[in-house]
Image: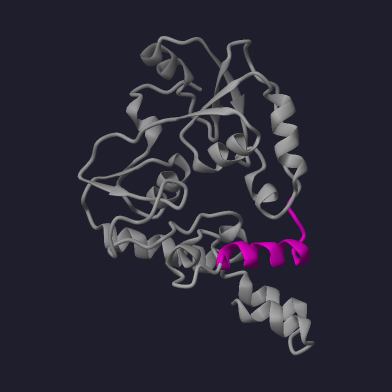
Amino acid sequence: MMAVPLLVARGALLPADALEGTSLCLGCGACTAHCKVQVPVAERLLSWRGDEVSRPAPEPLHRVAGDAVCVCVLTDARDWSADWAASSGRAVSVLRTGDSLGHASWKLGDREVVAAVAAHLVGREIVTGSGAVAEVAMAAGLTVHRLEAPTAGQVFHTCHTGPRSSTSQLACCGRREAFPTREPDAARAVALENVRRLGDTATACADDECARWLNEHGARILGPTDSYRSFHG
């Protein structure tokens, strides 16, 4: 894939054909981590694609419900904020997002995403079980409280939480960025391969969105918000 931008620059490959090939990049950064000569492969591919790929429009930021400093950012229909407030002893506000605070748009080069999040949540602290939400919030200069995954037999490490623990898991769950929409068949294949490798052993994952994605494909994974027994809404 790294040869693609060079071939385009030399006129040996059309940009449309190049994009078809680089669309298989997950953006997980495993190639960068394993490169023996420290070439930032993922970052360079992302930079090139950012110039050639139309960015998805970020979802408008919803109103924060409440005045408390701690804002629980909810990425699906489940509302675990009351349970977290009870366990932490802190008052909470709630913010819902359907696109992880515009994470995919930001990763494709839309710098206005971070500025908008910083202005929208100035003076707040973020509570989240989503690695994507945490990335955007930290880039916006906000304090982030990451939810911890429940204890389980094994741990599924995501690209948001650190390197894989062994060769028995892939470097990415297959959900990263817009991969499921760009390459749905490949994304599903990645998910199913992870599920096959995980087997029937109960597994913990420190990222709710990855856990939900893999569970949709047959895994048994506990995400951070599964620490809270009751959900509202």
Indicate the colouring scheme: one colour
Q: How many marks?
A: 0
The answer to whether residue 59 of the structure is visible from this angle is no
Residue 183 pos. (x, y %): 58, 66
Residue 46 belongs to magenta span: yes
Residue 72 pos. (x, y %): 53, 23
Quadrant position of the N terminus in the picture: bottom right
Reply above or below: 146 against 107.
above
Q: Quadrant of residue 115?
A: top right
Report the span colored magenta. 40-56
The answer to whether residue 154 of the structure is visible from this angle is yes
Residue displayed at 70% across by 32% down: 117
Residue displayed at 51% across by 22% down: 233
Residue displayed at 70% across by 49% down: 105
Residue 216 pos. (x, y %): 42, 50
Query: What predominant SS class does the magenta segment belong to?
Result: helix
Q: Is residue 175 left or right of residue 150?
A: right
Q: Is residue 143 left or right of residue 15?
A: left
Residue in the foreground of this view, choosing between 176 and 76: 176
The outermost residue toward the front is 37
Residue 146 pos. (x, y %): 45, 32
Q: Is residue 106 left or right of residue 226?
A: right
Reply above or below: 187 against 225.
below
Residue displayed at 40% across by 50% down: 162
Reply above or below: 63 against 28.
above
